[in-house]
């Protein structure tokens, strides 16, 4: 599984980091830190939860 976070679509709601802090981090301004990486199997559920939590659809899991 791969996860991508497009920061150009991020509005800083912080829902991703609240839902799955194992994967998502916020910068000092409250916007998500870019992600483009493979996700280990034990974090697949967290990745999907983060994707669903983002109202801007900035997070893609495939
Ligand atoms: S939930 Fe979406 S919009 Fe909010 S900080 Fe995370 S990536 Fe950005």
Image (spheres, rainbow, N blue to C red):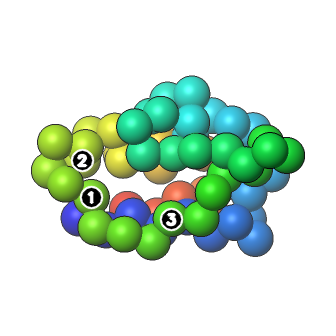
Q: Residue beneath label 1, please?
A: 39
Q: Residue beneath label 2, please?
A: 44
Query: Is the CB atom of the residue marked by disc 1 within 8 angstroms of ligand 1's nearest atom?
Result: no
Marks 1 and 2 in Cβ contact (< 8 Å): yes
Q: What is the x, y in percent for residue 51?
A: 47, 49
| Disc 1 to disc 2, C-alpha distance | 7 Å
Tell me the quarter of the picture where residue 28 sits.
Answer: top right
Q: Nearer the viewer, residue 34 or 11?
A: 34
| Disc 2 to disc 3, C-alpha distance | 14 Å
Q: Residue beneath label 3, please?
A: 35
Marks 2 and 3 in Cβ contact (< 8 Å): no
Give the class, few, some or many, for how many residues have Cα within 10 Å of label 2's Cα (few <14, many ≥20).
some
**In the rendered view, does 8 fall on the left or right side of 46?**
right
In the rendered image, the quadrant that contains the N terminus is bottom left
Residue at 67% across / 44% down in the picture? 26
Q: What is the x, y in percent for residue 17?
A: 57, 36
Which one is in front in this view, the residue at disc 1 or the one at disc 2? Answer: 1
Q: Nearer the viewer, residue 1 or 32?
A: 32
| Disc 3 to disc 1, C-alpha distance | 10 Å
Residue extending furthest toward the left: 41
Q: Nearer the viewer, residue 55 or 36?
A: 36
Which one is in front in this view, the residue at disc 2 or the one at disc 3? Answer: 3
């Amino acid at each position: 599984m791969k996860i991508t976070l497009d920061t150009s679509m991020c509005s800083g709601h912080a829902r991703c980091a609240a839902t799955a802090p194992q994967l998502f981090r916020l910068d000092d301004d409250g916007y998500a830190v870019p992600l483009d990486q493979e996700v280990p199997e034990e974090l697949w559920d967290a990745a999907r939860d983060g994707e669903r939590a983002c109202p801007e659809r900035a997070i893609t899991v495939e």
